[in-house]
Structures are given as structure tokens and as C-alpha cells.
Amino acid sequence: MAVSQAKPEKEGDDCSLLPLVHDIIKCMDKDNQDVHQELAKLKTKIQEAREQISNMPGVDSSPQEQQQQLATLREQVRTKNQLLQKYKSLCMFDVPKAS
């Protein structure tokens, strides 16, 4: 899995399968011949979801590796927050403005 290959998801993308299942049930209730078309749409949607999942970052990492990475990132945040607080607490001298 490559992170660079993952395309950004559009804001309007919907991963819900429920509307498609609802359409299939409606077609079956009406004895409509479009049920095969609706089933094909559902199959396509499931395949797209599988592809999106396989392209997610971290899927190829074990849970232990993910926990280690999370701990490392949390430590980095803690260190950076400490440095930021230290920087804020430094006594800043007023520099006279050149007129």
C-alpha cells in the first residue's frame, strides 16, 4: 500500500450501502426486473469500499507497530509542547523601533 497512491476522498462521497439495499428490496417487492442492475450497483459499491480500505495508511502495519508509532508521535507532541512552553516563558527584551 502506498500513501501517495491514495486519492483524496471527495466531500460528497458516500460509503453507505443502505440506500442500495433499500433500492434492491423495493425492486424485489415490485417484482421489478431492475433487481439485477441494483445488485450490480451494490457489488460495485462493495468493491470500491474494499479498494478504499486496502489503500488506507497503516493497514499493512501490525497493531503493535501502530501502537509503537502512536507512542512515538505522542512523545514528539509532548516534547514540542514543552519546547513551546519554554519558548513562551523566555524573557523577551523590548527592542527599540528604528524611527
Image (cartoon, rainbow, N blue to C red):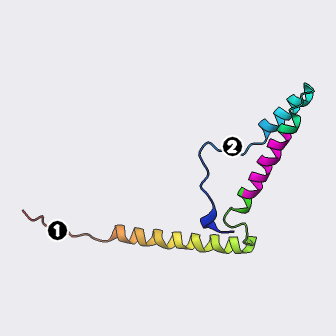
Q: Which stretch did the figure color magenta?
A: 39-51
Q: Is 75 left, or right, of 97 in this rendering? A: right
Front one among 22 and 31:
31
By secondary structure, the bulk of the magenta-drawn segment is best described as helix
Task: State the quadrant of the C terminus.
Answer: bottom left
Look at mark 1 in the image and give the residue it sits on: 95
Q: Residues within 10 Å of mark 2 (few under 14, many from 20)?
A: few
Q: Is residue 47 magenta?
A: yes
Quadrant including the N terminus: bottom right
Viewer-closest of 71 and 66: 66
Q: CA distance from mark 2 to mark 1?
A: 55 Å
Residue at 32% over, 71% down: 90
Disc on res. 14: 2
The amino acid pointed to by label 1 is Val
At 47% from the left and 71% from the top, the residue drawn is 80
Question: Which picture quadrant has residue 23?
Answer: top right
**Left or right: where 27 falls relative to 57:** right
The disc labelled 2 sits on which kind of residue? Asp
**Left or right: 4 as drawn, with respect to 14:** left
Magenta stretch encompasses residue 90: no
Q: Position of residue 83 (x, y in %)?
A: 42, 72
Provide the secondary structure element on which disc 2 rests.
loop
Of callouts 2 and 1, the N-terminal one: 2
Q: Is residue 27 left or right of residue 94?
A: right
Residue 32: % across, % down: 89, 28
Residue 17 lies in quadrant: top right
As helix, strand or loop, the secondary structure at mark 1 comes to loop
